[in-house]
Image (spheres, helix red, strand yellow):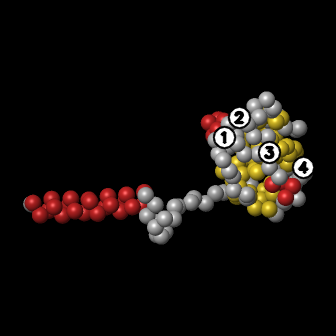
Amino acid sequence: MKTDKLTILSNLFVALSVLVSIGCGGDGRTSGESPVPALPTIIIDNITLNIEIAQDENTRALGLMHRQSLPENQGMLFVFESTRILSFWMRNTFIPLDIAFIDENGKIVDIQTMAPLDETKQYVSAAPALYALEVNAGWFKRNSLSVGSTVTF
């Protein structure tokens, strides 16, 4: 009976070690590499962009606040419950950003450049939108994208 308890405890220890290893990034990477989850992508007129999605009140309120940088081909897509005039500001946002307002059909209806840390200005969509996409300032121009470009989700 004592041997059975030791075997069970030994097996339990091995199982827990495996679970801890998996939970701590034991996914076959070499030491020093951190796991990076794949981000979803959208396509804007044949340009692929990795996105984070802010689709609830808390994630939309936080947005890109407190970040010091944003990778070049990455952005944050804000998803709203209904189409309406949208308004954004740059509280605690250190990165100069472009924002595209996108209608329910995926058409960009407005693009604006937002200044970091400027809480005095509100960036209001020129037309009703269901989505807003924030990327590094100048990204749309560098990729020859403009109002009327189409976003494929």
Identify the residue at image location x=70%, y=42%: 94
Earlier sequence position, callout 1 versus callout 3:
1
Instruction: Name which residue type carries label 3.
Output: Ile
Give me the disc on residue 99. 3
Q: CA distance from mark 3 to mark 2?
A: 15 Å
Residue 17 place in picture, x, y as percent: 32, 61
- Decide if residue 21 is in sight here: yes
> Badge 2 is on which residue?
91
Earlier sequence position, callout 2 versus callout 1:
1
Circle 4 or circle 1, nearest the eye: 1
Instruction: Name which residue type carries label 2.
Output: Arg
Earlier sequence position, callout 2 versus callout 4:
2
> Badge 4 is on which residue?
147
Instruction: Name which residue type carries label 1.
Output: Met
Q: CA distance from mark 1 to mark 3?
A: 14 Å
Q: CA distance from mark 4 to mark 3?
A: 11 Å
Residue 81 place in picture, x, y as percent: 72, 38
Residue 15 place in picture, x, y as percent: 31, 61
Which structural element holds mark 2? Answer: loop
Which structural element holds mark 3? Answer: strand
Which structural element holds mark 1? Answer: loop
> Badge 1 is on which residue?
65
* Residue 114 as seen in the image, left or right of residue 19: right
Number of residue marks: 4
Is disc 2 surrounded by few (<14), some (14 to 19) or many (20+) residues within 10 Å?
some
Earlier sequence position, callout 4 versus callout 1:
1
Is disc 4 surrounded by few (<14), some (14 to 19) or many (20+) residues within 10 Å?
some
Circle 2 or circle 4, nearest the eye: 2
Is disc 1 surrounded by few (<14), some (14 to 19) or many (20+) residues within 10 Å?
some
Name the foreground residue: 73 vs 4: 73
Circle 3 or circle 2, nearest the eye: 2
